[in-house]
Amino acid sequence: MNKGKLFVVSAPSGCGKGTILLEVLNNNKNLFYSVSATTRTPREGEIDGVNYYFLSKDEFKREIDNGGMLEYAQYCDNFYGTPKKKVFEKLEQGIDVILEIETKGAMQVKGVMPEAVLIFILPPSVLELRRRLNKRGTEEESVIEKRVKEAEDEIRRAFNYDYIIMNDELDKAIEDFEAVLKASKLTKENNKNMIEEVLKNA
Ligand code: 5GP
C-alpha cells in the first residue's frame, strides 16, 4: 500500500482559502484535514478541537519542547502549529493529509518532508484582499493592516511553492485545486509499485 500524500496549503488571510477547502474536503472524503494548535483567542463560532486546538502560550511551548509539533510559527503576535502525531498516523494508513498553514511553517515542512506538495492560493490583488478583509468584519482596522502587510510578505514566498491557484473565480479555483490533488497522485514516485506489478506480469 502507498503511504498517504501530504498537501500543504497556504494563502494570505482573506483569500477565500476556507471556502475552497470546505468544498474540496466535502468532495474528497478520503482527505484528512489536520486541526492546528494556536494561542490566538477563538473567534465567534469557533470550536476547540474543530477549528483549532486553542492553547495557552505555556501549553503551546510545552508541546514544542515535547517534540509534538511538525512545524510552528508566529503569525501576527500568536503562535500556530501542526500537531505531529495524527498527521503521521494518517499518512502511514495511506490517507492523504491537508495542512492549512502559513508560509514560514510550510517552508519548515518542505525541509523535513521534501515529498510534501505545496499549494499557494493567490488573491487577484492586494487591493481586493484588503476589501475582502474589511467585508469579513471579524478584525479591527489595525489588525487588518497587519494582516495585509503579512499577506504581501507571504505572496513573495509563493515562489517556493509547487502549485499556484488564483482565486478570482471560486468554481475555477476549486476545480484547479482538485486537479492538483489528482495530478499529484499520478506521479511516477507515487506509482512505482504499479509499474513493477505490470512488468512482473509481462
Ligand atoms: P487565522 O488566525 O486567520 O485562523 O490564521 C492565521 C494564519 O495562520 C493563516 O495563514 C493560517 O493558515 C495560519 N495557520 C493556521 N494553522 C497553522 C499551523 O498549524 N501552522 C502554521 N505555521 N500556520 C498556521
Image (cartoon, rainbow, N blue to C red):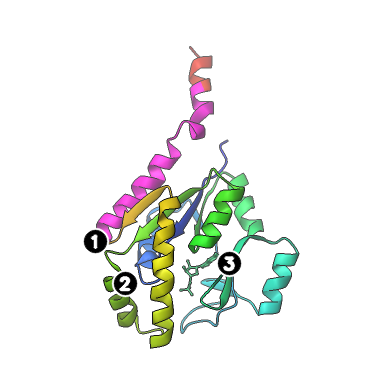
In the rendered structure, does residue 186 fall within the stretch colored magenta? yes
* First in sequence: mark 2 vs mark 1: 2
Q: In the image, is 146 to the left or to the right of 58?
A: left
Hey, what amino acid is under mark 3? Ala
CA distance for labels 2 and 1: 14 Å
Name the kind of residue labelled 1 in the image: Glu
The residue under the point 43% across, 41% down is 184
Residue 17 seen in the figure: yes
Query: How far is mark 3 from mark 2, CA to CA?
Result: 22 Å
Residue named by callout 1:
169
**Three-letter code, disc 2:** Leu
Q: Is residue 54 left or right of residue 118?
A: right
Secondary structure, mark 1, is: loop
Q: Is mark 3 within 8 Å of ligand 1?
A: yes
Image position, residue 150 (x, y; %): 44, 71
Q: Residue at x 62, y 45 (%)?
A: 92
* Relative depth, front residue between 41 and 196: 41
